[in-house]
Image (spheres, rainbow, N blue to C red):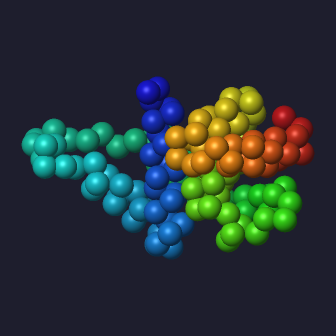
Amino acid sequence: MAARHRSRTRALQVLFEWDMRREPIDHAIEHYYDTLHSEETQTDVQLKPDKFMEELARGTVANAEQIDKKIEAKAANWRLERMAVVDRNILRLAIYELERNELPGPVVIDEALELARQFSGDESLSFINGVLDAVHRQAGN
């Protein structure tokens, strides 16, 4: 798994926890790192922080209010709280990345769809793709 895709996967897991628990994002990040330690890794090996994951998670949460408005505007007949938690956070993460303009929009959307294939159901793929495509087209990127 490529390093950036792994970081996106980790960021999605952190965002899921943040969304469910409604605790500060730093608590969710810290908890994620704690879960990486198993009995097998309780040696002197230090886990390196995943800076890209942290940047994605913190940036997504810092912009969540504006991102959520964009999702609601493009997700016809779907209220945010009625969406599956994982789908909602895939959308948040991808829209944050789209707004950063560091990668071409189609690459960001493909990454989001890969996360949906891994963590959500088949029916979510077209929904996520449609919302992200609409957000991307509106931004004119």
Q: Can you give x and y, in whole percent of width and height, for residue 99 in the image? A: 73, 44
Q: Can you give x and y, in whole percent of width and height, for residue 42 in the image? A: 12, 47
Residue 117 versus residue 58: which sits nearer the camera? 117
- Residue 47, by quadrant, is top left
Q: Can you give x and y, in whole percent of width and height, for residue 76 in the image? A: 86, 60
Rendered residue at 13%/43% (across/down): 40
Rendered residue at 28%/48% (across/down): 36
- Residue 26, by quadrant, is bottom left
Residue 18 versus residue 59: which sits nearer the camera? 18
Placement of 12 over or under 114, stated as above or below: below
Q: Quadrant of the C terminus?
A: top right
Rendered residue at 74%/30% (across/down): 106
Apparent side of residue 113 relative to residue 12 in the rendered image (left or right) = right
Q: Is any part of residue 62 visible from this angle?
A: no
Apparent side of residue 110 relative to residue 137 in the rendered image (left or right) = left
Placement of 79 over or under 92, stated as above or below: below
Q: Can you give x and y, in whole percent of width and height, for residue 45 in the image? A: 16, 38
The residue sitting at the left extreme is 43
Rendered residue at 46%/63% (across/down): 17
Apparent side of residue 30 relative to residue 6 in the rendered image (left or right) = left
Q: Is any part of residue 116 visible from this angle?
A: yes
Apparent side of residue 88 relative to residue 9 in the rendered image (left or right) = right
Image mark count:
0
Placement of 106 over or under 96, stated as above or below: above
Q: Quadrant of the N terminus?
A: top left
